[in-house]
Image (spheres, rainbow, N blue to C red):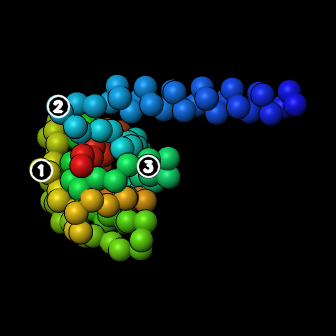
Amino acid sequence: MRLGKFLLCLMTVIFFSFTDLKNSNNISGDWYLLGDKNVDNGVDHSVIYFANWSEDVSKIKLKMEGYWIMYNIKIHFDDGVKQDVTLRLEIVKDSESDVIDLVGGLRHISRIEFWHSRINRDAKVAVWGRN
């Protein structure tokens, strides 16, 4: 019985923590942080998984920190469909991509693969989404 109460309390804390995090990451209207990843020096392929994100989105944009070149991305949806996007963005400092419309409208993203070159220092990429 004690274990059941403990698990119920733990799940409640996690639920409200996730809700507060989601709401605190809302920027400029209805854009939400879906996930981010630090990119180590010398790595040219990275993946962000969205297993804990339950919202569907119709648009995404990338915010990048550091100095690097983003070549393209592959967006994987939970139904197995993939969308390739060629970017060729040279990030001189911190910047963001244009808005990327997802094929098929409102979709659930399972992961995004990134192909990039590192220049000079560690970098970070964040994926933002909106309905």
**How far, Cα to Cα, is label 3 from label 2?**
21 Å
Amino acid at dot 3: Ser
Q: Is residue 1 or residue 55 the one in the foreground?
A: 1
Mark 3 surroundings within 10 Å by alpha-carbon count, few (fewer than 14), some (14 through 19), many (20 or more): few
Find residue 107 and report its horizontal and vertical position in percent. Answer: 32, 61
- Whether residue 13 is situated above or below residue 73 in the rendered picture: above
Q: Earlier in the sequence, mark 3 or mark 2?
A: 2
Give the mark toward the camera: 3 or 2: 3
**How far, Cα to Cα, is label 2 from label 1?**
15 Å
Question: Which residue lies under the disc numbered 2?
Answer: 28
Give the mark toward the camera: 2 or 1: 2
Question: Which residue lies under the disc numbered 1?
Answer: 98
Question: Which residue lies under the disc numbered 3?
Answer: 54
Q: Is residue 88 or residue 35 the one in the foreground?
A: 35
Tell me if 9 is positioned left or right of 71 in this view: right
Tell me if 47 is positioned left or right of 70 in this view: right
In the rendered image, is residue 64 in sight? Answer: no
Amino acid at dot 1: Asp
